[in-house]
Amino acid sequence: MRENDLIRKLRERLRDPAGVVGIGDDCCVWTPNGSTCLSTDTIVEGRHFRADDSPALIGRKAAGAALSDLAAMGAKPVGATVALTCPTRWDALAVMEGLLAECERHACPVLGGDTTGGEELVITVTVWGEAIANAHGPSRLVTRSGAAPGDLLVVTGPLGGSLASGRHLRPEPRLAEGQWFATSPYVHAMMDLSDGLAADAPKLAAASGCGCLLLPNQVPVHDDVPVMSDQAKAACCDGEDFELLVAVAAEHWPALQLAWPFPRRLSTVGWLVDQPGAFRENSQGRVVPLEWSGFEHT
Amino acid sequence: MRENDLIRKLRERLRDPAGVVGIGDDCCVWTPNGSTCLSTDTIVEGRHFRADDSPALIGRKAAGAALSDLAAMGAKPVGATVALTCPTRWDALAVMEGLLAECERHACPVLGGDTTGGEELVITVTVWGEAIANAHGPSRLVTRSGAAPGDLLVVTGPLGGSLASGRHLRPEPRLAEGQWFATSPYVHAMMDLSDGLAADAPKLAAASGCGCLLLPNQVPVHDDVPVMSDQAKAACCDGEDFELLVAVAAEHWPALQLAWPFPRRLSTVGWLVDQPGAFRENSQGRVVPLEWSGFEHT
């Protein structure tokens, strides 16, 4: 399909929200309400999905992974743009249908983009969002850098086995949960888990000028992790879970957990420490260097 | 270079502007001043540049082509994100150096991005900007859709020969000119010329619910177009000029031209008509269907 034909088909599919200039101009145009956040996420054939994965699921993953970055700030989605580099052997429209359905599911209108040909399928999704105001407190966006030594590390769901099971193609961006966390003064920092807890927790800690200690036995293990494997290590290292990792004031943890309105279980998986670096408890209860690496996309 | 090493080197290179969360969090965060516009642009190896082109110039092109979309709205750049899919045979850092230098030249901080490996070099740049206020008038962003039949079509410089000469790797986004046009009430619509006047003028006309008539002999021909070629056709069809195309109220054209403060020559190249479609004057002065297609990237 030629670029102009694809764009024509997509324009028929899309409707711009009121008050917004979307598809078809040099830029999309909107008027923000206060602080705005934006993230760009790319997935590439052979690295983030396989050549025999479903085009619609690949599109879904591209959108879901990008939206997960908005969830990680506690933001409400405002819009998205898509850059699609698509070889003729792929069904570009099927990829875009999966992507658009995922954006629609999260009330995030696709307002622009660019399509090109290429030798391998590459999808870049840029999403932007805003802080929400609600009855629980003032609106804000939650960075990785607001935590302090002593803060608990909490995750929003079981981890591990995402790549092997194919769950990585069906990310569930925790947008509602992220927005709820953003209204709590007890939540000091937040990020989404894409490279695995063992890789991501040290990033949050470093951004906050701390180290971290993980308790591998406390990490909830996803059903996708095989029973005969090292389950705690899989939960810490497999990656692509797209759950939230939150740093919480330890003294207010019971109050936060009691107020939590979602069915997903919150789990404490460690805390931040003043010594730089990443540590874990070993099976004897001793603090040792973490020495587990998460999943690094090449 | 592994993704984490590249990101570390880039972080050393980048400094976030005051009041902004940039590289290193899940999203970048900024607080907009009123209407905001955003565009995403992708360039792909073998389609928008060659394997033997300079990595720094390729990075420059990726940034310049995206910034040209902000120029086309009359916007001032606020920030950019970069998604780089880079095979190991390419020097990712050299590409990024060229890209960052171009962004710095236009005071557009790079605030985030994503890097992945891949089989071919793909660079997606997302830029956003804001309407500027100045002494000449109120701030606004200029879409493609505000023009009316009778409006003159004006271009900001000579066209043609960009691809053959290699000039396409050194786009000059007309940001200052675009911002100036946005302050004039006589400017009704604007876009940048990426696919050639013969392809782009009909897009502006259609977005405004009009047709267009081009006068090929009025189109200024760039020195890059060979003398022995069909120069008027080259100027209309070659593409990748990154000049601005503006629809101007014909009755105010002398006033606008007199007020124009830039050294670049403005040229009238046709006007909008109420009959849908694209037309040109032929060598006998007759109106005929345009029947020239611009450059379409595959």
Image (cartoon, coloured by chain):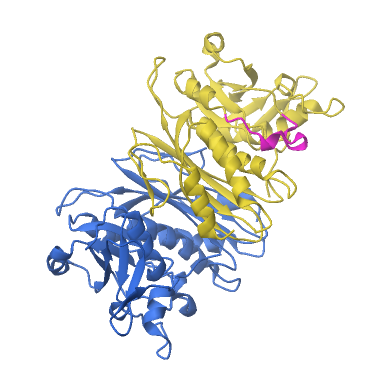
Chain colours: A blue, B yellow
Total count of labels: 0
Q: Nearer the viewer, residue B241 or B206?
A: B241
Q: Give me the residue at 66% from left, 40% from top.
A: B57
Of residues B247 and B128, the one drawn nearer to the viewer in this rendering: B128
Front residue of A107 and B286: A107
Rendered position, B117 above or below A132: below
**Residue at the image point whose x is 77% and y is 30% from the top:** B233
Placement of B227 over or under A203, stated as above or below: above
Q: Quadrant of residue A118?
A: bottom right
Image x and y of residue A23, in percent = 49, 44
Residue at 44%, 67% in the rendered image: A195
Residue B171 image-quadrant placement: top right
Membership of A127 in magenta stretch: no
Q: In this rendering, would A53 be left or right of A129? A: right
Q: Give the quadrant of residue B137.
A: top left
Up-down: is A100 above or below A222? above
Tell me what residue is drawn at x 33 percent, y 74 percent.
A280
In the picture, the quarter occupied by the C terminus of chain A is bottom right
Q: Nearer the viewer, residue B14 or A61?
A: B14
- The quadrant of the rendering that contains the N terminus of chain A is bottom right
Answer whether residue B163 is magenta in the image.
yes
Q: Which residues make up the magenta segment?
A: B160-173
Give percent across and percent down for residue B64: 58, 36
Residue B25, image x and y in percent? 38, 53
> Is residue A114 shown above or below B235?
below
Task: Tell me if residue B148 can be seen.
Answer: no
| Residue A155 in sight from this viewpoint | yes
